[in-house]
Image (cartoon, rainbow, N blue to C red):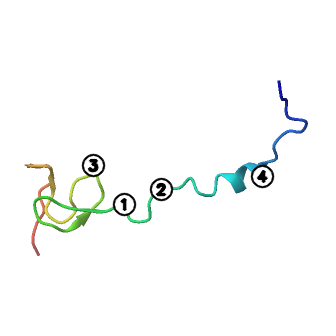
Amino acid sequence: MAVPKRRTSKQRKRKRRTHYKAPDNPYQPCPKCGDPKRPHRVCPTCGYYGDREVVQIDDF
């Protein structure tokens, strides 16, 4: 059975993992108003989460 001769260094490990990252644009359109919002969060524009109003947004 093969056994590593040396411990993998932090630098080599991090070089290998450079491609493990989140997508660049984590925004999606709000189903209610269409403005971009982050997934699984209340829309900052209209205050809706899915089909129900969670936050009351006042118009100025």
* Whole-number angstrom distance, CA of label 2 to CA of label 4: 21 Å
Q: Nearer the viewer, residue 12 or 10?
A: 12
Position of 52 with respect to 17 (left or right) is left
User: Is mark 2 in CB contact (under 8 Å) with mark 3?
Assistant: no
Identify the residue position indicated by label 2 in the image: 22
* Whole-number angstrom distance, CA of label 3 to CA of label 1: 11 Å
* Whole-number angstrom distance, CA of label 2 to CA of label 1: 8 Å
- Front of the two marks 3 and 1: 1
Q: Earlier in the sequence, mark 3 or mark 4?
A: 4
Q: Would you place residue 1 above or below residue 16 in this image?
A: above
Q: What amino acid type should be assigned to the residue bearing mark 3?
A: His
Q: What amino acid type should be assigned to the residue bearing mark 4?
A: Arg
Residue 31 spot, x, y in % from top left: 13, 58
In the figure, residue 34 lies in which quadrant?
A: bottom left
Mark 2 residue element: loop
Identify the residue position indicated by label 4 in the image: 12
Position of 13 with respect to 58 (left or right) is right
